[in-house]
Image: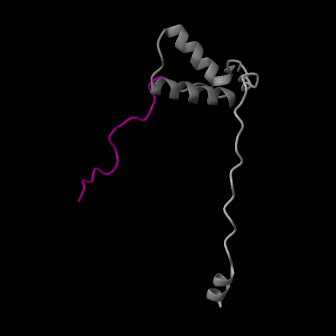
Amino acid sequence: MADSNRRERSRSPAKKRAARSSSSSSESAPKPKVREPVVKTGVHLKIAEEETKRGRPLSGAERDQMFRDFAREQQGLPPLPAGGGKGKGGGGKGKGKW
């Protein structure tokens, strides 16, 4: 029965595109709005201040440390000690691949 319904349906005629009139010189595109600079707040502001103070961008580890310390500061906890990351220390059971 699905085949009989398919045969009975006809396709709609192709739509014709309306001819566009050429735009006159008096009709110009609207000018884009001027965006204000983004105001940094919170940890991003602290990172930007630290980068300007040091005169160089912070490394990934330094940024991570600042993010963690900021979150701890918000919770009322003391900042983490410098270089206290876990890193690639040994540990585990020491088993090999097999």
53 horizontally vs 89: left or right = right
Quarter that holds the N terminus: bottom right
Residue 56 on image: x %, y %: 47, 13
- Occupied quadrant, residue 43: top right
Query: Camera-side residue: 97 or 29?
Result: 29
Left or right? Give the position of 15 relative to 59: right
Q: Toward the viewer: 85 or 91? A: 85
Q: Position of residue 63 (x, y in %)?
A: 51, 25
Image quadrant assignment for residue 25: top right
Total count of labels: 0
Q: Quadrant of the C terminus?
A: bottom left
Q: Residue at x 72, y 26 (%)?
A: 29
Q: Quadrant of residue 88?
A: top left
Give the image's coloring scheme. one colour
Q: Is residue 5 left or right of residue 86?
A: right
Q: Nearer the viewer, residue 68 or 77?
A: 68
Residue 68 in the image, given as x and y percentages of width and height: 57, 30
Residue at coordinates 67% horizontally, 23% vertically from top-left? 42
The part of the chain drawn in magenta is 81-98
Front position in the image: 40 or 29 = 29
- Residue that sits furthest to the right in the current view: 26
Query: Residue 93, relative to residue 31: is it above or below?
Result: below
State the residue at coordinates (71%, 19%): 34
Q: Is residue 18 above or below residue 36?
A: below
List x then y, in percent, for residue 89. 34, 37
Can residue 48 be found in the magenta stretch? no
